[in-house]
Amino acid sequence: MKYFISFVSTIIISILATAQAGTSHWNIEKGRALQGYDAVAYHAQQKAVRGDTHFAITHRGVEWLFSSAANREAFKKKPAAYEPAYGGWCAFAMGDYGKKVEVDPETFKLIDGKLYLFYNKYFNNTLVSWNKNETNLKARGDANWEKIIRK
């Protein structure tokens, strides 16, 4: 019996490790991308809109919520168009020093059709700093992100 329990435990650990491997670079909270905000609404409505569990899907091992069936279907058709830059981590931190830093999902910017999110707490809105040096920070952020996802 104890060998059986050990065997089952090993299988469960392997399954969990495999599931997490696909999600390791995403900024997820409780298994959800964008802290439950609707990825399509950022583009379609130019604002942060909370998603609803009634319009949820799993993509790349992560749950994504949407505010409508239409937004969910738009995401299903072209997920790469709506996935946030840098896995949803703070764009400024990625560009400035190559680190994964949490974000405020209501502090964002669309650049060439891509969603960038920013840390905004304790009187520190990194979007302001990003805007002062966007070209350089974006280039460095892209390079830093490539290093992270290739590890």
Image (tube, rainbow, N blue to C red):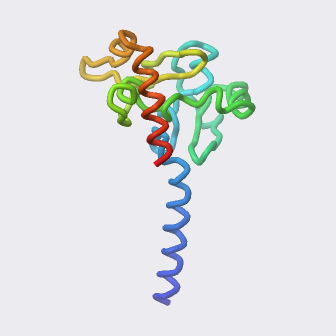
Residue 56 found in image quarter? top right
Between 140 and 48, the one lying in front of the other is: 140
Residue 6: % across, % down: 47, 81
With respect to residue 140, does 57 lie above or below?
Answer: below
Residue 89 found in image quarter? top left
Is 119 left, or right, of 63 in this rendering? left
With respect to residue 46, does 115 lie above or below?
Answer: below
Residue in the picture at 59% in, 48% down: 61
Residue in the picture at 67% in, 26% down: 68
Residue 73: % across, % down: 73, 30
Residue 39 found in image quarter? top right
Count of labels in the image: 0
Residue 132: % across, % down: 36, 9
Residue in the picture at 64% in, 15% down: 44
With respect to residue 123, does 31 lie above or below?
Answer: below
Is 48 left, or right, of 132 in this rendering? right
